[in-house]
Amino acid sequence: MSEFGHLSETFRQATARDLREVLENHARYWGERDLRSLHLPALVHEFPETSLVAVADDGIRGYLLGFVTPARVAYVHLIATRDDTRGTGLGRRLYAEFAAAAGEQGAAQLKAITSPGNSGSIAFHRSLGFEVRLVEDYNGPEQARIVFTRELRQPL
């Protein structure tokens, strides 16, 4: 993991305690959207190398929970930045840290999903060079999702 001195954030593996802190401050990361049920402690326990937090003196500024599949796909389950850190490039830096960790595990591609109405996520992933496509019934009948994919060898 690395540290960006001018931004005073340190990137490190997330812990179960970090996950509890994120959930206690859920609205700071997700606003009105209630995504607490997606914050699975098993991800932190089973995929520690690719479950990351960006921390500073004022706490957790952002986090990314992900894992590498047997097909060498680095899947991002959740990525969020705290409301007071948006627009600082922290999301991009979290993705870069994740890509480096996933690459060490042999990943060749990055992947994430979102709902079709999540314009912020779509714009963010496009800015990172992801291919964006709508997949009908991805999450079950009549539950389309936007699927983001990107080759890992491209720099973020």
Image (cartoon, grey):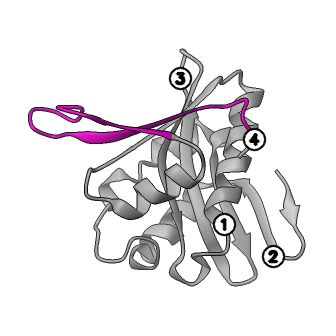
Circle nearer the N terminus (1, 3): 3
Q: Amino acid at mark 2?
A: Leu
Q: Disc 1 versus disc 2: distance between alpha carbons?
A: 9 Å
Of all residues shown, which one is farthest toward the left? 141
| Residue visible at 71% across and 46% down in the picture | 156
Residue 67 is inside the magenta segment = no
N-term-proximal mark, 4 vs 2: 2
Query: In which quadrant of the rendered view does residue 113 lie?
Result: top left
Tag 1: amino acid: Leu
- Between the C-alphas of marks 4 and 2, the distance is 21 Å
- When the figure is inspected, residue 34 is found, relative to residue 6, above or below; the finding is above
Do the numbered discs 1 and 2 sit on residues whose CB atoms are within 8 Å?
yes
Tell me residue 83's x, y (percent).
51, 80
At label 2, counting other C-alpha atoms closer than 10 Å, the crowd grade (few under 14, some 14-19, many 20 or more) is few
Identify the residue position indicated by label 3 in the image: 69
Query: In terms of sequence position, does the residue under pointer 3 or pointer 2 come before the other?
Result: 2
| Distance from Cα at disc 3 to Cα at disc 2 | 32 Å
Work out whether mark 1 precedes mark 2 in sequence or the reverse, and give the earlier one.
2
Q: Please, what secondary structure does the residue beneath circle 2 have?
A: loop
- Which x, y percent locates residue 59? 66, 78
- Which one is in front in this view, the residue at disc 4 or the one at disc 2? 4
Relative placement, left or right, of 127 versus 154 is left
Q: Nearer the viewer, mark 3 or mark 4?
A: 4
Location of mark 1 (residue): 90
Q: Secondary structure at mark 3?
A: loop
Going by the numbered disc 3, the residue's amino acid type is Thr
